[in-house]
Image (cartoon, rainbow, N blue to C red):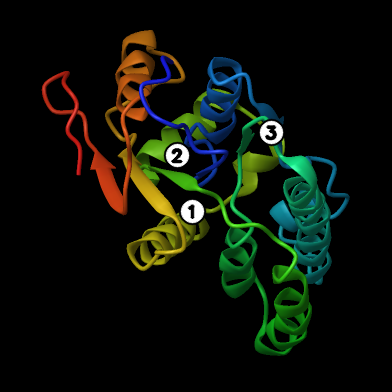
Amino acid sequence: MANLFEQPKFIAVEGPIRVGKSTLAGVLAEKLHARRVSEREDNPFLERFYRGLPGMAFPAQMWFLEARHEQMSQLREERNAAWQSPVVGDYLFEKDKLFAYINLSDAELDLYNRYYQILRADVPAPDLVIYLHASADVLKQRLKRKGVAQERALSDDYLQQVVEAYEHFFFHYTASDLLVVDTSELDFVHRNCDLQLLLKRLNEPIKGTQYFLPLGGEEAGS
């Protein structure tokens, strides 16, 4: 990616499961010679939560909250000192609360929010967020194709809830510049031409909220 303008120093890639976050974050980190921050995958409660075992939602959510806070607060310390190289993360800290509202009871959510409000103050805001959107039907197909055992336990209703929660959250998001990418027809994980099309768009400035939609094989912005 040519330096035609000053690239954002902190980019966060977001979207529901199997939308391509990790793939895009890895590609961007390589292209920008950036440090990559990947979400931890060793949550000891997650597999039991996916299987619907009672009482697993709250510990799974609190584990994610603490792990994400630890990573992001470390970034803030580095930024305050001398943050020179860019950073690409495959999640946005605020998404933790999104899942908490889906998965927790009212009493659990009240306790969760007490910790969230304290920990949120340590987290730096990204310069740019890339929100990867896809319909629930497309995500179902990708989940089947990926074939991860614990993910097969996710119900269609839960997946639809997640998609709608993301749509609602980013419809109101204003904390940083935002590029909304519709990946329902854009498969940059398996089609290099789609990836190159998206990288071309990311080589141009993004201010406010803008949209990237594939139209007849060409890009469409804002």
Residue 111 showing in the rendered view: yes
Lateral position of residue 218 relative to residue 28, left or right = left
The quadrant holding residue 2 is top left
Residue under label 1: 159
Mark 1 or mark 3, which is nearer the start of the sequence? 3
Report the disc number at residue 140. 2
User: Circle 1: is it few (<14), some (14-19), or many (20+) Cα within 10 Å?
Assistant: some
Question: Which quadrant, please, contains the C terminus?
Answer: top left
Q: Amino acid at mark 3?
A: Gln
Report how far apart the C-alphas of labels 1 and 2 lie in the structure: 8 Å
Residue type for callout 1: Leu
Where's residue 199, x and y in %? 38, 21
x and y, in percent, of residue 36 in the image: 68, 30
**Disc 2 crowd, CA 10 A, few/some/many (<14, 14-19, 20+):** some
Separation of disc 3 and disc 2 at Cα? 39 Å
Q: Amino acid under label 2?
A: Lys
Residue placed furthest toward the right: 44
The residue at which mark 3 appears reads as: 84
What residue is at 40 percent from the left and 51 percent from the top?
A: 177
- Label 3 sits on a secondary structure element that is loop
- Determine the residue positioned at 55% across, 50% down: 126
Q: Is residue 92 above or below residue 114?
A: above
Label 3 and label 1: CA atoms lie apart by 38 Å
User: In which quadrant of the rendered view does residue 141 lie?
Assistant: top left
Residue 151 horizontal/vertical position (percent)? 64, 41
Disc 2 element: helix
